[in-house]
Image (tube, rainbow, N blue to C red):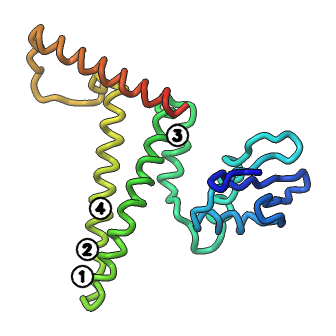
Amino acid sequence: MAAKDDPIVIKKYANRRLYNTGTSTYVTLEDLADMVKKGEEFTVQDAKTGDDITHPVLTQIIFELENKDGQNMLPIPFLRQLISFYGDQMQMIVPSFLEQSMIAFSKEQERFREQLKGAFGKTPIDMMKTPMKALEEQTRRNVEMFQNAMRMFTPFPSAGSNSAAPTEPPKKDEKSDDLQELKAQIAAMQRKLDAMS
């Protein structure tokens, strides 16, 4: 018998039917989307092989939701950027970055809701300013976090960067300190990657 905190197992059969072993009922992708919204943990397994197919099923749910009228949440520039990262050296950073961004955004959600509640009674323009400022600030922090992560993997300036005057070469001690700092950052990132796998 599964423990109470164990995720619910959803079995997917060859006929594409999904069976919730927790409730002993057949479910749809829409039911799974509702479970996600309620915070219910589940895994999806291929009924024949037992393989974990949670990722492709969740991706299919997003695809279905994106195709509903008025439900598009993923802007085209974001989709293009995401596609461009596949096969790129940055591919291994993107999942962690997106996960951390969504965690941070979720934490900010409650603050957004409180600001919206406090905004009632103000003019429509004022009502939009407060949450938009908070959203802009969160976006700025996410971009900054991503840029910092990028710098860890590209410690040298890009070829396209223009500097008005050549910089003075660092003194021997500064170069050594920079190298030590870079090594520490790489070691920290390696520990994070090891912990994720």
Query: How far apart are the two marked residues, 1 and 2, measured between alpha carbons?
Result: 7 Å
Q: Along the line of sight, which residue is nearer the eye, 100 or 87? A: 100
* Amino acid on which the number 2 mark rests in the picture: Thr
* Amino acid on which the number 4 mark rests in the picture: Glu
Query: How far apart are the two marked residues, 3 and 2, measured between alpha carbons?
Result: 34 Å
Marks 2 and 3: in contact by CB < 8 Å? Answer: no
Marks 1 and 4: in contact by CB < 8 Å? Answer: no
Marks 4 and 3: in contact by CB < 8 Å? Answer: no
Of pointers 3 and 1, the one earlier in the residue sequence? 3
Residue found at x 34% / y 25%: 154
Query: How far apart are the two marked residues, 4 and 1, measured between alpha carbons?
Result: 15 Å
Mark 4 neighbour class, 10 Å CA radius: few under 14, some 14 to 19, many 20 or more: few
Marks 2 and 4: in contact by CB < 8 Å? Answer: no
Residue tagged 4: 136
- Image quarter for residue 137? bottom left
Of pointers 4 and 1, the one earlier in the residue sequence? 1
Residue tagged 2: 130
Q: In this view, does 141 lie above or below 131?
A: above
Residue tagged 1: 126
